[in-house]
Image (cartoon, rainbow, N blue to C red):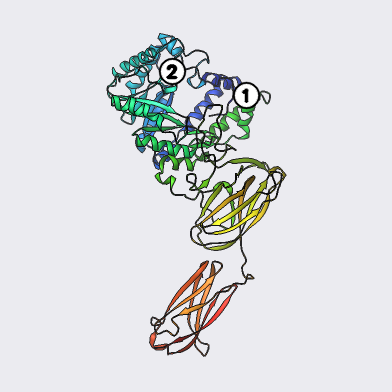
Amino acid sequence: MWNAFIEHASTTNLENAIEDLVGVEKKEQFFNLYRKNYILEKDIVFLAKEGFNALRIPLHYKHFSPSPNVFINEGFDLLDPIVELCKENNIYLILDMHAAPGAQNTNDFSDSDGETAKLFTQSENQIWLASTWRYIAEHYADEPIIAAYDLLNEPVIPWGYGPEVLKSIYVRSIDSIRTVDPNHIVIIEGNWYGNDHTGLLPPFDDEMVYSFHHYIGSSADTNWIHQYTTNLSHQYNVPLWIGEFGENSNSWAYNKINLFEDNNIGWSWWNYKSIERISSLLSYKINSDYQQVIDYWEGKISKPDTNTAYQGLISMAESIHFDSCHINQGLIRALIDTSYNTVKVSYENFQPPGLLPATSYDVGNNNIAYFDNQIEDPSKFSPETKSWNNGWSFRNDGVDIGSTYINNKKIYFVGWFDDGEWLSYTINPENPGNFKLSAEVASFSNGTKLSLEVNDSSMIGPINIPNTNGWSSGWRIVSLGNITIENETTLKIKANVGGFNLKSLIFTELDISSIPMNLNLHCHPNPANSMITINWESNFSLDTEIKIYNILGRLIFEKKIISTKGDNSFDWLIESQNYNTIPSGIYLLEVKTINSSDLKKITYLK
């Protein structure tokens, strides 16, 4: 979450590494700011507005009980403001023991020593965990916004121990909780990071939920879920909950939650906020100050002085503020919006003319807002793992987005195009207009081509893209053609022959005054006695004047409208224009635009 690649980056090791850089006092100042900014009122309001109804908060035992039989309020001081915000916004809280006394696995995220899961090997740690849960439960026993206690995150039983030791830990903790809180749900996770519930059946509490975590496998694979629904939930009539799933693409997320909800299983996506991580709901940038800290931890530079290191850490803690974060719109839609698989929406309210970043393609699923051959990673955490976004930046779709620096500014581009892949851009203009459309491109090879499709009908291209030896030798601007944008317009950029990168689409106002156009003006009925329908064609969206003169050249009717691209018509209701003052006779109809005009003789008979 921090890009802090120190050896075995446990909580304790991270804290020690920070203390080594800035000392105890500045370390505490950093953590106070970090924890304050990570979850603010704006974050809770945002989650509620987007449609989420639960928040799973990882806990470290030391904030409640730093040593056996010693209890402190630090954890409550951190949690209670969040509890109040969640009550105001109707969001439930699940309290998750992410780091238990002694550690429930050997991973860094449980704050282990990396060698032994001492929660299982030392009984005093088991007693310590149970008393810590009793202390927490007593504080929140009457708080209905707390939905449940997730007793132990991702336990892994050490070699030589059986499932009975995990069950005994759960039984002890639940018994301890029930002495002060008979009502709240308790959630238990299986062995092997939550997924093996051997020895934990049948249920041993009336308010028990079974939980597992899910990060691997294709979204098309649905058979595995029956081990939980059939063998566990249905057989024992207990609810299921997926306490963590994620770290995969938006498309994978959408398919997974549909599978979960079809089987009446609630879920929680991991995680909410990380540094430059495309699969978290919110992300924040690594700034140059914090980058120095990261570089030192990775051994790239010498140790920075205290003030430099402190400034880097504080700058990171400030960057996680909601106002500084990038919101993953696509992931929100995938998790919440049931139309994600059928409807595309604009990524931004772009108003031409101007520059539209290539990364601002529409929001929606594969084959709806874009098409890419690799849209998820079905082999997560295995040697066959493969990224769905080869550039691993900016957005979480199958679209491959890379980054580079131009004039010391980081910019993003869409790259790694394969043949047939495409991007959709929906534009909703405030005013119609005509534009010359160009693309800013780079290519690594000869023969790459792209085409442009407008509103799923008219096609421009294929257009050859020059070989620029990649973006390092500079981007090139290629002309795509002239387009008219009136109402909602969808542009589709397609790679006919892949191997190029796309940085932006450039819309330039088109001067059409010198472009000749045939109006093909005609009208009917002619002669007419009450109404004449006037028809003409336009190659562009244009200001248009309709004028009607009598035989003496006097103007008797005038109307200004905007022609749309294609066929146009207007009804002249003669009777509505003071019927008695318009005599029968011959009249001249003129339709005029900036680049064309046409006359037609019409006859009116009363």
In the rendered structure, the answer to whether residue 565 lies left or right of residue 53 reads: right
Residues 339 and 109: in front is 339
User: The residue under label 2 is which amino acid type?
Assistant: Ala
In the rendered structure, the answer to whether residue 475 lies left or right of residue 110 reads: right
Place residue 72 in its image quadrant.
top left
Count of picture labels = 2
Residue 199: x %, y % from top left: 36, 16
Is there any visible trace of residue 314 in the rendered image?
A: yes
Residue 184: x %, y % from top left: 30, 25
Q: Quadrant of the C terminus?
A: bottom left
Q: Is residue 382 above or below residue 494?
A: above
The numbered dot on residue 297 is: 1
Q: Is residue 537 above or below residue 188?
A: below
Residue 6: x %, y % from top left: 59, 22
Q: CA separation, marks 1 and 2?
A: 26 Å
SS category of the residue bearing label 2? loop
Residue on which the image places disc 2: 100
Is there any visible trace of residue 42 in the rendered image?
A: no
User: Do labels 1 and 2 touch, CB within 8 Å?
Assistant: no
